[in-house]
Image (spheres, helix red, strand yellow):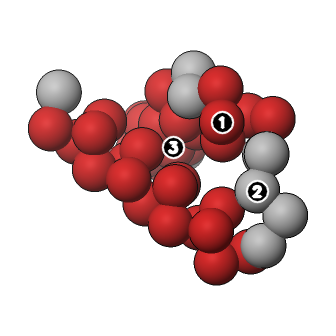
Amino acid sequence: YDQERYKQRNKVERLFNKLKQFRRVATRYEKLKTNFLAFVTVALIVIMLR
């Protein structure tokens, strides 16, 4: 059990949970990879600005 590693893992898991709150990311409406990655990028920017 590594406490520092667990802290980092927890941060990553929380980020993915926040990202999945965006319905468009969770259901992946876009068929093209570039469009999907663009929306994931926008969602991450919104999360970081909050």
Amino acid on which the number 2 mark rests in the picture: Glu
Label whose residue precedes the other's in the sequence (3 or 1):
3
Name the foreground residue: 22 vs 8. Answer: 22
Q: Which of marks 2 and 1 is nearer the N terminus?
A: 1
Are circles 2 and 3 on residues that touch, CB within 8 Å?
no
Instruction: Give the residue number, with chain letter if any, for mark 3.
Output: 12
Cα–Cα gap, marks 2 and 1: 8 Å
Marks 3,1: beta carbons within 8 A: no
Residue 35 shows in the view? yes
Q: How crowded is mark 2: few (under 14 residues within 10 Å), some or many (20 or more)?
A: few
For mark 2, give the secondary structure. Answer: loop
3 vs 1, front mark: 1
At 43% from the left edge and 60% from the top edge, which residue is drawn?
41
Task: Give the image quarter of residue 25.
Answer: top right
Q: Which mark is residue 34?
A: none
- The answer to whether residue 36 is above or below residue 19 is below
Q: Quadrant of the N terminus?
A: top right
Say few, some or many: other residues with alpha carbon within 10 Å of mark 1 (under 14 / 14 to 19 / 20 or more): some
For label 2, the residue is 30
| Left or right of 12 in this view: 46 | left
Asked if residue 15 is positioned above or below residue 23 in the image, the reply reads: below
Q: Work out whether 45 lies above or below 24.
A: below
Q: In the rendered image, which quarter contains the C terminus?
A: top left
Q: Which mark is residue 24?
A: 1
> Which residue is rendered at x = 49% and y = 27% of the image?
18
Does the image show residue 3? no
- Separation of marks 3 and 1 at Cα, in angstroms: 20 Å
Q: Which sits in the foreground, 24 or 21?
A: 24
Mark 2 touching mark 1, by CB under 8 A? yes
Q: Looking at the image, tell me whether mark 2 or mark 3 is earlier in sequence order.
A: 3
Q: Which amino acid does label 3 sit on?
A: Val
